[in-house]
Image (spheres, coloured by chain):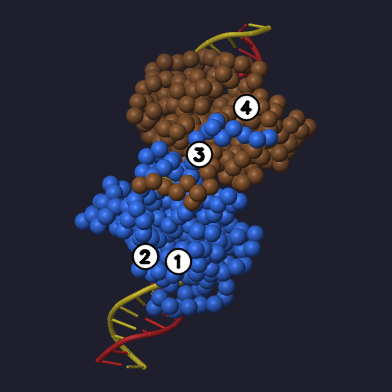
Chain colours: A brown, B blue, C red, D yellow
Amino acid sequence: MPYDPSAFPPFAVTVDLVVLTVRRHSLCALAVRRGETPFQGRWALPGGFVREDEDLAQAAARELAEETGLCVHDPAAPAQDDGAHLEQLATYGDPDRDPRMRVVSVAHLALAPDLPAPRAGGDASNARWAPVEELLEQSGYGRTGEPPAPLAFDHAQILADGVERARSKIEYSSLATAFCPPEFTVGELRRVYEAVWSVALDPRNFHRKVTGTPGFLVPTGGTTTRQGGRPAQLFRAGGATLLNPPMLRPEV
Amino acid sequence: MPYDPSAFPPFAVTVDLVVLTVRRHSLCALAVRRGETPFQGRWALPGGFVREDEDLAQAAARELAEETGLCVHDPAAPAQDDGAHLEQLATYGDPDRDPRMRVVSVAHLALAPDLPAPRAGGDASNARWAPVEELLEQSGYGRTGEPPAPLAFDHAQILADGVERARSKIEYSSLATAFCPPEFTVGELRRVYEAVWSVALDPRNFHRKVTGTPGFLVPTGGTTTRQGGRPAQLFRAGGATLLNPPMLRPEV
DNA sequence: ATCATAGTCGTCTGCCTGACGATAAGCACT
DNA sequence: AGTGCTTATCGTCAGGCAGACGACTATGAT
């Protein structure tokens, strides 16, 4: 049955990505420099139009691969290395969010281990990992030093929502392992929590908690000294996805 | 700056609503009967196109008011009675989810106290409150008796996601009060939890938990006997929105 | 050898929860 | 008025878990 196209207003639909990683003890997000108007030259979240024949999750995975080379970690094939976690975040559709036309953006959240260097379609100068406080500083969603230049569109809001989602989700799920390489130590995992939450955690209590939660971590047998100090056991992520009881975020 | 419309495919954008309430000790959702093809005569979630000049939240609030007469409870004016809770749920954009054309639906979740009777544009026979298990029975998202007829489109999936959101969110937030009238007793609140989770809770431990959580409930001074038995104190929702520590859902 | 750095194992205390006994205060009967 | 039923509310007790923190271990650097 044909449908009257005048019965509804046409929209452009995009996916935008909040890609988070932990670098040098701080939570960083991927930002790309805009080459076109509007907001030309400003930093923005990576994203693009959803294609005709594409699901939203497919579009987000495609954009993620284009920007970072990351494959999405498929829950059905958990053996693969270097997969990123990808989930839908929220949808932003303010009529004025893009001055050109009516655009509805379905934002996605991706969590990735620390990567070599970003490539935005091969051009490195147009993509970077930036600490999230820096990106949010001047937007009212974070406050510290001097405003460099706020993110384009409503991307500061989207980033803030993505960061908040990540912060709360590592409380009650094993998602923090998505920030780690395939094999990692308890200390590395703890530094992920500390970076994402911006807090210091007691190493002893943290160790007891994560090793005591069944299914969270499975030892691989190996050890490493890559952090200096006494060698630490290596683990990989276990099958458990939900942490019960949750990891408690200390109140500030 | 004009924009090349051939650069992106046009989409229709709709909002769909999962409106939940508790009636007769069970969690119910609002369903409307479709008058048009496709899925003519089948039950579906209420929803409609987003208008040109409308935000997504506005569109959802407008649809909610059209279908139920409910106003959205504005956090800025918490004094108003009978407001419903409304939040964005998720966005569904499978290319084949609507056979007519490419439709992206931004689903919203609404929680309302028990209402008189639904009105779908004035026509009562085309709208009803149905227990969620009944609506999900034949869809693979729930399983019991005989399939009456599955919900239209991917609405069973949307409903299942909305129910799961509500079930998990009342754990760590004070959202369960959105299912209650402005003044309510501890027992009424407990029956909300029991209906949403389909479990039985110990009245004594529940009472201790909710009255002991600061900011969750504030006594109004009044009492009621509308449940029979000893008169119970009346409360209204306090300012706290996050429950810490959370209300624990008993494992089955 | 000594020190600095991390990792790992224990202990103790306080809080919260689940299980459940006991009492209170209404209503519907007889 | 009493008996029984219902729901509300308070109290007690034991177990589990988290925060604070002491102690010991195993590396590399000086």
Is residue D12 positioned above or below A152 on the image? below
Q: Amino acid at mark 1?
A: Gly
Is residue A133 positioned above or below C28 on the image? above
Left or right of A96 in this view: A191: left
Residue neighbourhood size for the residue with mark 1, other residues' Cα within 10 Å, grouped as few (<14), some (14–19), many (≥20): few
Residue at the (42%, 15%) spot, across then down: A222
Residue B41 in the image: state x and y as whole percent: 31, 58
Observer-side mark, 4 or 1, equals 1
Residue A31, numbered circle = 4
Left or right of B85 in this view: A236: left
**Are circles 1 and 2 on residues that touch, CB within 8 Å?**
yes
Quadrant in the rendering for residue D30? top right
Q: Amino acid at mark 4?
A: Ala
Observer-side mark, 3 or 4, equals 3
- Give the SS element for disc 4: strand
**Are circles 4 and 1 on residues that touch, CB within 8 Å?**
no
Query: What residue does disc 2 label?
Result: B126
Residue B146 in the image: state x and y as whole percent: 21, 56
Q: What subunit carries mark 3?
A: B
Residue B10, numbered circle = 3
Q: Quadrant of the N terminus of chain B?
A: top right
Residue B184, numbered circle = none
Q: What subunit carries mark 1?
A: B
Residue at the (62%, 16%) spot, across then down: A124
Please tell me which residue lies in front, C14 or A246. Answer: A246
Residue A207 in the image: state x and y as whole percent: 49, 30
Q: What subunit carries mark 2?
A: B
Residue B121, numbered circle = 1
- In the displayed image of the protein, which residue is found farthest to the left? B146
Q: CA distance from mark 3 to mark 4?
A: 27 Å
Observer-side mark, 2 or 4, equals 2
Residue A117 makes an appearance in the image: no
